Amino acid sequence: MAERLAIVSQHIKNNISPQSTAATQLPVYTNKQDDIVIVSALRTPIGKAKRGLLKDTLNDDLLAVVFKAVIEDAKINPADIGDVCVGNVLDPQAATTARLAQFYSGIPETVPVYTTNRQCSSGLVAFMNVAGNIKNGVYDIGLAAGVESMSTYGMGMSGYVPNPRIGESQLTQDVLMPMGITSENVASRFGVSRKDQDDFALSSQIKAKKAADTGLFDAEIVPVTTVVKDENGQERTVTVSKDEGIRPTTLESLNKLKPAFITNGTTTAGNSSQLSDGAAAVLLMTRREANRRGLPILGVFRSFAVKGCPPDIMGIGP
């Protein structure tokens, strides 16, 4: 774990001192032709679920936007894609959704597509799966994506009938623990105070606003032209090009918010992430293939790791 943290820290050049790098033996990477590289990475704007301009846009439409954009950005023949993996949590027909998006975006039926669900890390798992298959020589080019419409699909389990055996142990009961409670457990167990969370939330909002105002997100965002309905059911066509979660925030306003889940808790609406609608896609291939096609290399995939954790502190893993 220390080695992995050192590698991540190395990416943040301004925060590394000569003393800290000398104390840790960091791996030295050399470019290899079979490196897994990112040649295109694009996303939709992130909308506010239930209230934003993407609330009436379905998963397959969101996904098709980023599929098509990545293919056009890299100027590849979509038939050359070896596999497509999509991370999704809430859509009960996610496999059908991914297949529809494939056809909407012009990817032929000869390209296989599947979905994966590891809760909040589903998009990352899709990336890992595609990268791993390229590394193993299954194919040279793969498309990894993630999509979620929390406006369309709620977080509840409609029609779910729990197994009576769930009550046999605390561990099995904890599997059904709501995320808000696991958040409070993590904060309590690891000493993350309300002030820590509010400070981090404020810092995040400030950095996000600065990045948006200076156009740092523009190159990665694909505008979405869609139809949105008002409270009376009237439709209008809009083009969404900006994230909707960035809002004016002060420490004073954050401090005034009440805990959302338990009395005297630390998790509030202000220091938690919003419910969102959006999609993202990444095109991966070997360095050899990227060089052959003359494509820019945005990043190199080195490794990944997963680790299980107790369900009552879900959030520190996997």
Image: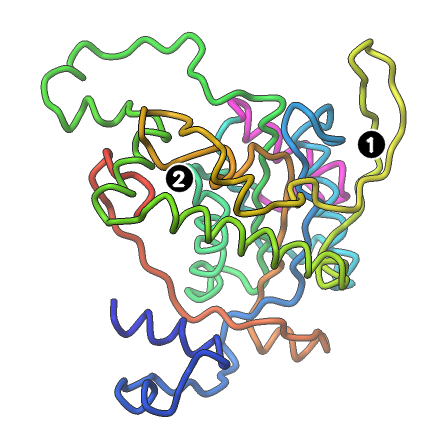
**Is 144 or 76 nearer to us in this picture?**
144
**Is 316 or 15 nearer to us in this picture?**
15
Q: State the residue position of label 1.
A: 226
Lateral position of residue 75 relative to residue 144, left or right: right
Q: Is residue 35 magenta?
A: no
Instruction: Give how far apart the Cα atoms at labels 2 and 1 are.
Output: 29 Å
Point out residue 150 in the picture as x, y percentages from the top left corner: 58, 27
**Is 267 or 255 nearer to us in this picture?**
255
Q: State the residue position of label 2.
A: 118
**Is 197 or 117 nearer to us in this picture?**
197
**Dividing the picture into quarters, in which one does residue 185 lie?**
top left
Point out residue 192 in the picture as x, y percentages from the top left corner: 30, 48
Residue 317 seen in render: no
Lateral position of residue 148 relative to residue 71, left or right: left
Point out residue 107 in the picture as x, y percentages from the top left corner: 72, 45
Q: Which residues are magenta?
A: 91-112
Circle 2: residue type: Arg
Where does the N terminus fall, quadrant-wise?
Answer: bottom left
Point out residue 250 in the picture as x, y percentages from the top left corner: 58, 47
Residue found at the very far left of the displayed protein: 168
Above or below, 144 against 99 in this view is below
Q: How many C-alpha atoms fall within 10 Å of the one at disc 1: few (<14), some, or many (≥20)?
A: some
Q: Dot 2: what SS?
A: loop
Q: Name the image colouring.
A: rainbow
Lateral position of residue 298 relative to residue 35, left or right: right
Q: How many C-alpha atoms fall within 10 Å of the one at disc 2: few (<14), some, or many (≥20)?
A: some
Residue 8 seen in render: yes
Above or below, 252 against 38 in this view is above
Picture residue at 76% right of the left edge, 52% below the top: 69
Instruction: Tell me the tag on residue 134.
Output: none
